[in-house]
Image (cartoon, rainbow, N blue to C red):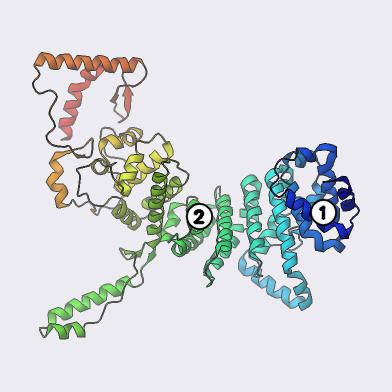
Amino acid sequence: MEAEQLKRLEAKEADHIAAILDEFNTKHADLLIFDSFRTDNQWHELWLAIFGILDDQQLSHLHTQCLNTVRILTRDEFSLQTNYIEQEVNTLLRLARIEASSLKLPATPDELKQQERERKREQEQKQEEERQPSPGQSEVIAEALKCLCNLVYQNADCRRQCLRQHCLDAILKRVASSMRHPCALEYYDMKLLFLLTALEPSARSRLQIDLNGLTYMTKWLDDKLGEEVAAGEEQLNIICELLKVMFNVTSAPDKSPNEYEIQSLHLTGVLRELLLRFGQMATDKERAVITHAINLLTNISGSCLTELTLRCSNAENALEDRDKDKDKDKDKDGDADADKGAQAKPKPCCSQCFEKRNVRSLAVLLGYLRQTLAQQEAEASSSHELLSPVLTVLVKCARSDRVMRHYLRQEILPPLRDVSQRPEIGQELRNHLCRFLTLPAMILRDLSAELLFVLCKEDVGRMIKYTGYGNAAGLFAKRGILDCRRVEGADSYSSDSEDSDTEEYKRQQQGINPVLGCVEPRGQRNPLDGMSEEQKEYEALQLVNLIEQLRQGGIVKPALIDKDGRPQPLEHILQLQEELPQQQLDQKRKT
């Protein structure tokens, strides 16, 4: 900026300010490097000149342009760190209408409504209209919030100043108010709240405990979902930011367990409605909403996740109607067509009814998992950022409720029919999860193993049946069950059998290799056929020597299974031969 233009800004020459700022904002709209502004202290002088205009109410018609300039200047982290800007931050808080307020935030949304009704009775209509921002004022508020978002992200002192000025209280009060605000204002309110709660742990505690923020935000989300108008992209952006704030707040709950569980139950019910509404994931933005909802569900205890399913109200009526129809068929011997006409049609139950429960929200989670797996396979990516949250939620669901476990087992581990291929080969959910069992990425590997093991009711034999011993060996070693012993706590699962084998599986069962988890191809020649005993002994010794070389090089570690069911490294490979008779004896006892 030229020196003459800067002087005109400092002198507040109203006739020239608009043109100067328009030129500056257009020219530097994408500016990220401010080295040229640091010479001759130009950044600081321009900063002070702009805020001089913002402090002048007679130039309020220029405030939007000024805030655009401030937003550009707040990208310079170095200048923000080296200049004292506390007064300017207070100005932005005032323009954003989130400065400290004397009004105490009510404890619950119901108290807030009562307080608003009393205030409306006390205040005149004129005062109420003045409190409601006009479109021009809303634009100024939104631009000020953008500037504060940059400052909070760039500068720790600004974050602490915002907290001292109780901006959390003001934002939450605006969220909880029944007054309608433009989408841009709501979006940047949530964006600022997200940055504060993400970067300042004290903000999370205050929002959750002192301000009871989770209750207000849950109510606001419920109201958003209850709107009859279809949610546009702007509303979806707001919901995404709101879910991110709620994730931050619930990541480390500080409330008492009982109080937090009550809030979580209500929140889970609202998230269920969100999953049902946007579960089709017709657009990228709807998919983003589901992603953030799943992230939030990872912070909710398993005992509250039962709210994801509802009891089907029509299930019992439908069963009763079917029973009545059967009785009619037995009693009547008349014409079949007449019977059909006389029969009453049973009331249809919901489309996603399973064991008298509506499991559509679980179907949405599985649909999201399938889409994410397909996307990562197309991109040849093994990143766990999108997969680990949904797997975590599925593990919690399977552990917390019998019906949810039954449904997930039906979808992920259906009865086996074709066992000609290895469990990790294919495109079904079971195949994907079996492939994850041998990944070097520990998070995906452990979550996949945990999910499959829980769906198998922590039964080692059933786990081997669906995954093969080779794929599950890592899980068995970690849990100390390499010798296929029974897992402690497995008795806590329901005793009803849900592992009926198909006729196809029974016909091939005898030929299944339990290590591979499939039937070995027929016609393979045994490499030992045609060898003499001396040749076999020679090849065995060669194998021992090769394994010993690998052990000495640190490539492999031969091990035995100790009494705890965990692998114990060997000092020499010949120890395997010493332990062989005892292992054979133990195996005979088990069989």
Few, some or many residues within 10 Å of mark 2 (<14, 14–19, 20+): some
Q: Quadrant of the C terminus?
A: top left
Q: Residue at the spot x=57%, y=65% of the render? A: 219
Residue 372: horizontal and vertical position, in percent?
A: 42, 49
- When the figure is inspected, residue 522 is found, relative to residue 495, above or below; the finding is above
**Label 1, on which residue?**
20
Q: How many marks?
A: 2
Closer to the camera in the image, 108 or 244: 244
Closer to the camera in the image, 469 or 69: 69
Closer to the camera in the image, 563 or 86: 86
Few, some or many residues within 10 Å of mark 1 (<14, 14–19, 20+): some
Among numbered discs 2 and 1, the one appearing first in the sequence: 1
528 left or right of 407 in image: left
Q: Residue at the spot x=27%, y=16% of the render? A: 546
- When the figure is inspected, residue 107 is found, relative to residue 85, above or below; the finding is below
**Label 2 close to label 1 by CB (< 8 Å):** no
Looking at the rendered structure, the secondary structure element under dot 2 is helix
**Label 2, on which residue?**
288
Is residue 407 visible in the rendered structure shown here?
Answer: yes
Residue 193: horizontal and vertical position, in percent?
A: 64, 54
Is residue 571 visible in the rendered structure shown here?
Answer: no
- When the figure is inspected, residue 59 is found, relative to residue 505, above or below; the finding is below
Mark 2 → mark 1, Cα distance in angstroms: 40 Å
- The three-letter amino acid code for the residue at tag 2 is Ala
Residue 543: horizontal and vertical position, in percent?
A: 23, 17
243 left or right of 118 in image: left
| Label number found at residue 166 | none
429 left or right of 69 in image: left
Q: Residue at the spot x=65%, y=69% of the render? A: 180
- The three-letter amino acid code for the residue at tag 1 is Ile
Residue 13: horizontal and vertical position, in percent?
A: 90, 57
Looking at the rendered structure, the secondary structure element under dot 1 is helix
